[in-house]
Image: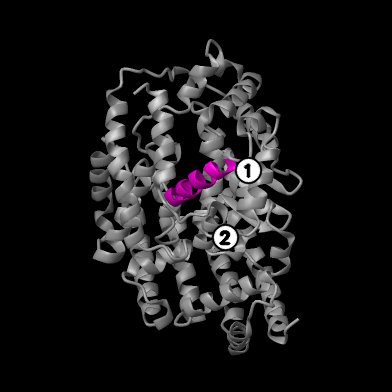
Amino acid sequence: MNQHLEAIHRTAELFEKYSHAVRVLQYDLETICPKEGMEEQGETIAFFGNEAYKLMKTEEFMAEVEAAYQEMDESWDSFDRALVRELYQSQLKNSKITPEMNLEFSRITQKAFTAWSRAKEAADFSLFAEPLAKVTDMERTIASLRSEVPQLKQETPYDYRLDDYEEGMTVADLDRIFGECKERLIPLLQKIQASPKKIRTDFMSREVTEEQQKKLAYKVLHFMNYDLNRGAMTTSEHPFTSEMARNDVRITTHYYNDAFASSLYSVIHEGGHGLFELNAPQENWEHHLNNKTMGQHESVSRFYENIIGRSEAFTNVLYDMVAECMPQVVEGVSKKEFYEALNTVTPSLIRTESDEFTYTFHVIIRYEIEKEIMNNGLDVAEIPALWEKKYKEYLGVTPSNDREGCLQDMHWTDGYGYFPTYALGNMYNAMYYNRMKEEVDIEAAIQSGSLAAVNAWMQEHVWKKADRQTPKEWIMEITGRELTPKDFLDYIEAKYTKIYEL
């Protein structure tokens, strides 16, 4: 092995041990840590995270990365090339950020998470406003520092943060993409709302127990081939996935006794994230490589949640599982009624509970608010009013309190730029779904009793190289085409035109 690579691997191994500890502590914080202990635990997380950061900021390590990057050529292992490229880009992005600054940034986000948890419980944005203002100042500072690095030059402050979540993505790209979405989805939503077709949904709020939901969740994970010897599941306020280590991927959900589909689809969504991590090549871990973008990741989670999970073939299988685990839900309900209810279009307030069609509007709203904050100096105190205005404009609904409004998501405790990746994920997966259909009988695969055939295709085409390619390279290799919203919009149009008999 190249001498520079040997040095890099030694440091990366120690970095990974610190990072593993941070992930365990963060998972604990978001699941079982008592409220009064959250702030202290957040300080511990910030400390260990910064110890890991310091390893990457030593002059010796930075010199090794620079030398490896300059010497790298096509004869190098593709995993090593990806690692060096990732480290070099990270080094550029963090070149102006000292360990002292990084520690302060970590403390800001940890305190913001604690404040958000309390504010959401109280449904009071004022409890979160000051910590969010500090997060916003942090985000603007990071963008400003990166603008001083010539190799990172972007058009707007928000572009610097978007690139962290989806490499190469810019405001100009998203304005165009979301413009196309609004152009086609707004008229279609109006047609759906005017349709005389009425979908039965009364059974969706029938009372179920937590135990029944848990039983259903494990049945679904088994069907998805989520390896419970290497994966785990528990509950949290906001469902998430954490890849702890090669053989330790954990997901969470949240149970509501009058909304069984909420937990069901969060399990499918997070289970998709989990499958992506559990099926990463062994070489990724040997090379300390974890470079999937959030758009790639959300494409997978939302592929299982929606394209597979809300398909008629899959809901027919789900119907039988629900009949076994919570028979009261489907008593007197046909499989067609079940399928249509799981795909009803109803403008609503909560992103994670929204239907597949209107979900894109939830993302667009958050994107437009983030853009105003980062590029136009919007004061965070104005967020609740702007949030209410945009929900009224796009979906015709108004939150009655901050919990069901701008406090519903935890993402802003970490800063801005994540939300657009959910919509980008829908666009990626619609593109590779069209490719998959050419090679896999998806309905037959679902009816076979597991998603093994679907997963095998995903392994070969979607998962295998994600850590070694930029999103543009990745989607081009899978589909032979550049990213476009057309496949997603065509899919939505065809599906919901049929359901609502337009």
Residue 224 x/y as whole percent: 66, 38
Q: Vertical placement of 119 versus 13: above or below?
A: above
The disc at residue 234 is 1
Q: How many marks?
A: 2
Q: Does dot 1 land on a helix, a strand or a loop?
A: strand
Q: Does dot 2 land on a helix, a strand or a loop?
A: loop
The amino acid beneath tag 1 is Thr
Quarter of the image that includes the C terminus: top left
The amino acid beneath tag 2 is Lys
Which segment did they paint magenta? Answer: 422-436
How dense is the environment of label 1, judged by Cα within 10 Å: few (below 14), some, or many (20 and up)? few
Residue 383 appears left or right of 483: left
First in sequence, mark 1 or 2: give its number. 1
Q: Is residue 144 magenta?
A: no
| The one of 472 and 10 positioned closer to us in this rendering | 472
Residue shown at 33% from the left, 70% from the top? 157
Q: Vertical placement of 479 versus 78: above or below?
A: above
Residue shown at 53% from the left, 30% from the top? 311
Residue 230 x/y as whole percent: 74, 49
Quarter of the image that includes the N terminus: bottom right
Q: Vertical placement of 307 versus 275: above or below?
A: above
Residue shown at 67% from the left, 75% from the top? 12
Residue shown at 58% from the left, 67% from the top? 44
Residue at image mark 2:
292
Q: Do callouts 1 and 2 mark residues in contact (Cβ within 8 Å)? A: no
| The one of 444 and 160 positioned closer to us in this rendering | 444
Would you identify the image quadrant in which residue 253 lies? Answer: top right
Q: What is the spatial separation of the Cα atoms under label 1 and label 2, in whole angstroms?
A: 24 Å
Q: Nearer the viewer, mark 1 or mark 2?
A: 2
